[in-house]
Image: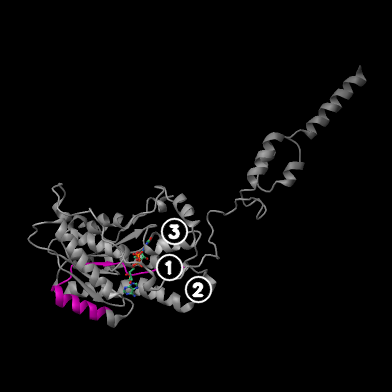
């Protein structure tokens, strides 16, 4: 009996030493948490599985590692030659004559707006938004012939959508390479001589290309920053100087991109992303610098919009359509006309107390 009792005490103390609460074995193999080590066998398997997801896991051990947030260096898209891009069509049925009530402060009547890169794509549709809202518009582009053709189409469109209108907005076309100070100044002189003044500026001239950072041709990178950043800056200071000389208020709208706030995947485009971040912060900086003169400066950051260029990128890389739309909460790419409201609002008196802002028109991309 005594022996039996001793045997039981000895067995109980051996069990206590091997029990999870006292064991030293799991503690030795776990790097971060003693608490995890106190769990029973079944839950230990779980925690091991989840460890793969953390910095405790071996690199590459988890099959989905980084799959949705990596750039892919095999994607390369060079900006196409002008002749390879189709010309844009004006938007139909978005304006014209209507009796729907809206704020008078949205009207751009008696204003003159300049739109750089207005011969095509987003710039053309934003030019149309200004025309529909009653402004005279100067379209500035490298491709002056296309700008001139589109200027006629916009006026014709306005005439047909507003039968009996006593005044049709005046739309003119001007050549400029926005990255060249001389070319910009010449275009501004021409516009002021044709229209008498400038009240609004929309800077849409810009482009993107995809190369991995190490292979990015240096001259292409300089050109990209020259057009996207210097071009925005040069037109902005030219128009601001004119407004200050006239002692007139004005509103400038820079076209940035959601790429100035996030890093797109999977196509690599570091210089473009940096350029668009510069555009956004330029808007904020100039808004502060010129607030005393009644000049407002804001930025519109579009997400993926379906234009000739994005269509070409999708034609070259069909798998991108699914990747892109899967990252957009609204699940769709935008159309150029989705910018019409934002640009009209920012140019108009309806946004009188809005300056230095960035309006994202991206289907919610940047908030997730
Ligand atoms: N399309 C998109 O999905 C998207 C998304 C976010 C931002 N953006 C930005 O919107 C702007 C317009 O893009 P888009 O898709 O309409 O492009 P687009 O190529 O269709 O149109 C750009 C226009 O700018 C002109 N241009 C180019 N370089 C110029 C220069 N040096 N001087 C004067 N004009 C010049 C072109 O001739 C063209 O008419 C760009 O700044 C682009 O970065 C586009």
Q: Nearer the viewer, residue 302 or 23?
A: 302
Mark 2 vs mark 3: in front = 2
Quadrant (top left, top right, bottom left, bottom right) of the N terminus: top right
Residues packed near mark 2 inside 10 Å, few (<14), some (14 to 19) or many (20 plus): some
**SS category of the residue bearing label 3:** loop
Q: Dividing the picture into quarters, in which one does residue 200 lie?
A: bottom left
Q: Dividing the picture into quarters, in which one does residue 183 lie?
A: bottom left
Residue visible at 41% across and 51% down?
367
- Residue 284 placement, left or right of 194: right
What residue did someone put label 3 on? 262
What residue did someone put label 1 on? 272
- Residue 212 placement, left or right of 223: right
Question: Is any atom of residue 29 visible in this view?
Answer: yes
Q: Are marks 2 and 3 in contact (CB under 8 Å)?
A: no
Question: Is any atom of residue 353 visible in this view?
Answer: no
Circle nearer the N terminus (1, 2): 2
Across and down, in percent, residue 37 comes to 69, 40
Measured Cα–Cα span from mark 2 to mark 3: 20 Å
Residues packed near mark 3 inside 10 Å, few (<14), some (14 to 19) or many (20 plus): few
Residues rendered magenta in the picture: 184-209
Residue visible at 74% across and 46% down?
28
Measured Cα–Cα span from mark 1 to mark 2: 11 Å
Q: Nearer the viewer, residue 290 or 279?
A: 279
Mark 1 vs mark 3: in front = 1
Task: Answer whether residue 200 is magenta in the image.
Answer: yes
Residue 216's disc number: 2
Q: Nearer the viewer, residue 322 or 130?
A: 322
Question: Cβ of disc 1 within 8 Å of ligand 1?
Answer: yes
Vertical order, 13 against 352 (above or below): above
């Amino acid at each position: 009996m005594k022996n039996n009792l001793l045997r039981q005490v000895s067995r109980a103390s051996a069990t206590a030493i091997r029990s999870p609460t006292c064991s030293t074995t799991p503690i030795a193999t776990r790097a971060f948490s003693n608490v995890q080590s106190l769990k029973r066998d079944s839950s230990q398997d779980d925690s091991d599985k989840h460890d793969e997801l953390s910095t405790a896991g071996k690199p590459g051990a988890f099959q989905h590692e980084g799959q949705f947030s990596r750039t892919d260096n095999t994607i390369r898209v060079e900006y196409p030659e002008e002749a390879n891009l189709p010309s844009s069509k004006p938007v139909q049925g978005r304006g014209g004559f209507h009796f729907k009530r809206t704020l008078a402060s949205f009207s751009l009547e008696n204003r003159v707006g300049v739109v750089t890169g207005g011969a095509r794509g987003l710039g053309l549709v934003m030019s149309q938004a200004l025309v529909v809202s009653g402004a005279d518009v100067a379209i500035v582009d490298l491709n002056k012939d296309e700008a001139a053709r589109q200027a006629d189409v916009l006026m014709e469109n306005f005439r047909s959508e507003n039968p009996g209108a006593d005044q049709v907005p005046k739309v003119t076309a001007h050549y400029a390479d926005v990255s060249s100070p001389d070319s910009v100044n010449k275009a501004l002189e021409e516009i002021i001589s044709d229209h008498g003044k400038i009240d609004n500026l929309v800077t849409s001239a810009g482009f993107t290309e995809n190369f991995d950072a190490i292979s990015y041709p240096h001259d292409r990178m300089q050109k990209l920053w020259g057009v996207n950043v210097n071009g925005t800056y040069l037109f902005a200071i030219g128009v601001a100087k004119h407004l200050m000389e006239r002692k007139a208020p004005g509103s400038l709208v820079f076209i940035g991109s959601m790429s100035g706030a996030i890093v797109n995947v999977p196509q690599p485009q570091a210089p473009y992303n940096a350029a668009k971040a510069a555009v956004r912060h330029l808007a904020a900086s100039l808004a502060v610098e010129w607030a005393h003169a009644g000049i407002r400066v804001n930025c519109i950051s579009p997400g993926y919009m379906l234009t000739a260029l994005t269509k070409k990128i999708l034609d070259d890389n069909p798998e991108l359509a699914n990747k892109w739309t899967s990252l957009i909460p609204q699940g769709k790419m935008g159309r150029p006309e989705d910018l019409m409201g934002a640009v009209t609002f920012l140019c108009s008196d309806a946004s009188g107390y809005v300056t230095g802002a960035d309006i994202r028109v991206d289907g919610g991309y940047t908030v997730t």
